[in-house]
Image (cartoon, rainbow, N blue to C red):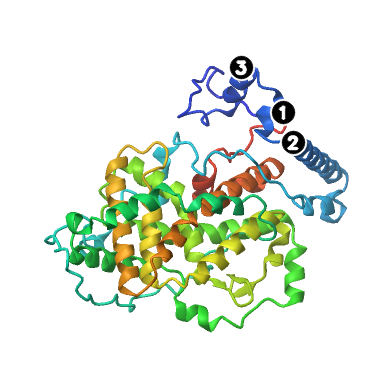
Amino acid sequence: MYSCSRQRNCLIDRTNRNRCQHCRLQKCLALGMSRDAVKFGRMSKKQRDSLYAEVQKHQKSQECVGATAVSIPNKDGVCGGEDREEGLSRSYSSGGSSSTLSDLDDIAALPDLFDLPLTPKESSEYCSLELHGGRASTGNTSNSSSASSSSSSLSNQNSPQQTMLDGADTTGIHLLHTHSLTHPLLKRTHALLDHLSDDCSITDLERITQSILKSHLETCQHSAEDMKRFTWAQYTPEETRAFQNKAAEWMWQQCAHHITNAIQYVVEFAKRIAGFMDLCQNDQIILLKAGCLEVLLIRMCRAFNVNNSTIFFNGKFALAQFFKALGCDDLVSAVFDLGKGLCRLQLSDEEMALFSAAVLLSPDRHWLTEGQKIKNLQEKVYLALQHSLHKSGASDEKLDKLVSKLPMMKSICNLHIDKLEFFRLVHPETAYSFPPLYREVFGSEMSLPDSTNS
């Protein structure tokens, strides 16, 4: 299926294994992996057989299309078209997705996609996360001014804030919540809060909060007011059925474009988080690739209507069943469940902004070179978030509940990668046509095969 342009002797290791799929395949086979294991990865025999049958079905359909095209150059004569439209109707969940972060061998090409290095002209307007104020005394709990909610909104953009593909069955994902309250970040945050006076001042926390809130409000696709205006704009049953009958390839394309547009806003948000620009370019890209979907999931609660369980998609609100054509019911359902859970927390713009920044500045991403520096930045953001919660009179449990969403968010990100890989196997040409930024963020292996021979 793949060919090598470098004399078939490429070095294959952890950092550059995706540069040559042919040599990677040969190395895996030489080390004793079966062809099925190499092709389909770690999954149960039942899942593997189902996926293999799907790929075979698609290949036969393509062969039939080719034969028909030779004799009858009429699109109406294509054999198997209906089968291909049903190509992703099966539910597939992987038990072994290791990471949402693709390998970094193509990192030299990413600055152009992310518009890096990050040097926004407005950077001087955003305060540094380094602490400038004096230390707060133990009794200093002075009232601070609340964050201003006025700011420019990017309402000229047409794409939805999120549109996280999918909906209908989250088996396995909820299990993570039983352990979520023991998340190490939660323990570390509480330890920091116990020694607030030794670390920073209330003034410092207010400065951090105002800076990140400003960045968040200026990089939201739709304001809360925009969403209120669209509240009653919902897809009719007839419109929903029309989308359900769309080909999987078409629906994936639509969602990929919407997600890509939303990612660009997250990139702008990251640029404006002071301290992020000071990280090395390698770490900036790693944090964006690993964390942008999690930030989109957080922002999703602005595009989610908890009253009727609908999400904003392309100008109207849609039910989970609307995305049936994707063939990812379990992923869609997980996203909708997370949306409901986040909406119940009733996050303010300030809380959402700080939580998004803290998630983006995650020091536990693989292959970071300045992990301690990122950890320090994240801890200050979490301190600002806790201060914001206390200032608004929220209970101490609200931060715990927020952090408890992190395992489910990571599970959704991993499941999305699994679904994308499945789609890539069945529809490689369509996957290759996804926007470059989407392909780089979510799958460095999404390259066009050199030949169709298996």
Left or right of 414? Residue 181 is left
Q: Quadrant of the C terminus?
A: top right
Q: Is residue 268 visible?
A: no
* On screen, residue 125 above or below 199: below
Q: Is residue 326 visible?
A: yes
Q: Residues within 10 Å of mark 1 (few under 14, many from 20)?
A: few
Residue denoted by label 1: 36
Q: Which mark is residue 31?
A: 3
SS at circle 2: helix
SS at circle 3: loop
- Identified by mark 2, the residue type is Arg
The single residue placed furthest to the left in the displayed view is 134
Residue denoted by label 2: 48
Q: Are marks 2 and 1 in contact (CB under 8 Å)?
A: yes
Distance from disc 2 to disc 3, alpha carbons, whole Å, reads 20 Å
Picture residue at 50% right of the left edge, 45% below the top:
440
* On screen, residue 38 above or below 180: above
Distance from disc 2 to disc 1, alpha carbons, whole Å, reads 8 Å
Q: Are marks 3 and 1 in contact (CB under 8 Å)?
A: no
- Identified by mark 1, the residue type is Asp
Where in the figure is residue 16, as x and y percent of width and height?
47, 29
